[in-house]
Amino acid sequence: MSWIEDSVVFRGAIRRSGNSLVITIPSELSQRLLLREGQEFVIYGIGRRRPEFEGGLQVYLGYFVVLEKVQVVRMKIDMSSGSFEKFSSMIKEFQEAYSLTDIKYKQSLPSIIEIELYFGVITERGVIRPKTREEVEEITSSIEFKLKLEGFKILEKEILEKIVEKKNIDPATISKAPYKITEIIRWRWEI
């Protein structure tokens, strides 16, 4: 996949600092990319002919890694009294209704499914409001009730916290977040 140019563009001038030449990164770009003082990077000289020669500098920051503390509801469900198709459609409804950020399934026995429902803040559409433990407990009770109505038996249920690593998040998603999420999100650039 090719690089996509950012919307923040600026003109500058190269300056001298001791024996080195330096450029300044404007605050808009450093905020958009969540850059920090002392951060490492790699600079590549780039050029192309078409037919004139063009040159540039690519400042490579690496991979943007996000660590998110997520509340997870883990359930073990007996499927013998219900259909998998109905269960699957209910889970999709729950994902929409309760803004689940991820769902993981595992079939442990022929009629037993273990499922994990992730209540994070980073979605494909942006950052959503963090849910409190009480809200997650209330949602879990509602999900449990709806599953029981359809004939599914909840064998085990627990709510826990996990740290989830994501490498496909644009830093602007976090820098423009409408909610305070610094207590549940950490990030870094990895070269």
Image (cartoon, grey):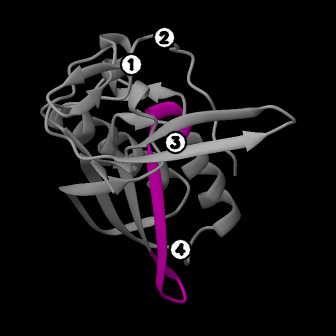
Residue type at mark 1 is Leu
Q: Residue at x 30, y 12 (%)?
A: 27
Mark positioned earlier in the residue sequence (3 or 2): 2
Kindly indicate whether the residue at mark 3 contacts the one at mark 4 (C-beta within 8 angstroms).
no
Alpha carbon of mark 1 to alpha carbon of mark 4: how far? Answer: 51 Å
Secondary element under disc 3, as helix, strand or loop, is: helix
Alpha carbon of mark 3 to alpha carbon of mark 2: how far? Answer: 41 Å
Residue type at mark 4 is Met
Q: Residue at x 53, y 74 (%)?
A: 79
Left or right position of 123 against 20: right
Mark positioned earlier in the residue sequence (2 or 1): 2
Mark positioned earlier in the residue sequence (4 or 3): 4
Q: Which residue is mark 3?
A: 95
Q: Which mark is residue 79?
A: 4
Q: Which mark is residue 185?
A: none
Residue type at mark 2 is Phe
Q: Residue at x 22, y 56 (%)?
A: 163
The picture places residue 34, in percent across and down from the top left corner, at 29, 29
Q: Camera-side residue: 116 or 7?
A: 7
Decide: few, some or many residues near mark 2? Use Cα within 10 Å; few <14, some 14-19, many ≥20. few
Q: Which residue is mark 1?
A: 29
Q: Which mark is residue 10?
A: 2
Q: Quadrant of the C terminus?
A: bottom left
Decide: few, some or many residues near mark 4? Use Cα within 10 Å; few <14, some 14-19, many ≥20. some
Alpha carbon of mark 4 to alpha carbon of mark 2: how far? Answer: 58 Å
Mark nearest the camera among 3 and 1 is: 1
Residue type at mark 3 is Gln
Mark nearest the camera among 1 and 4 is: 1
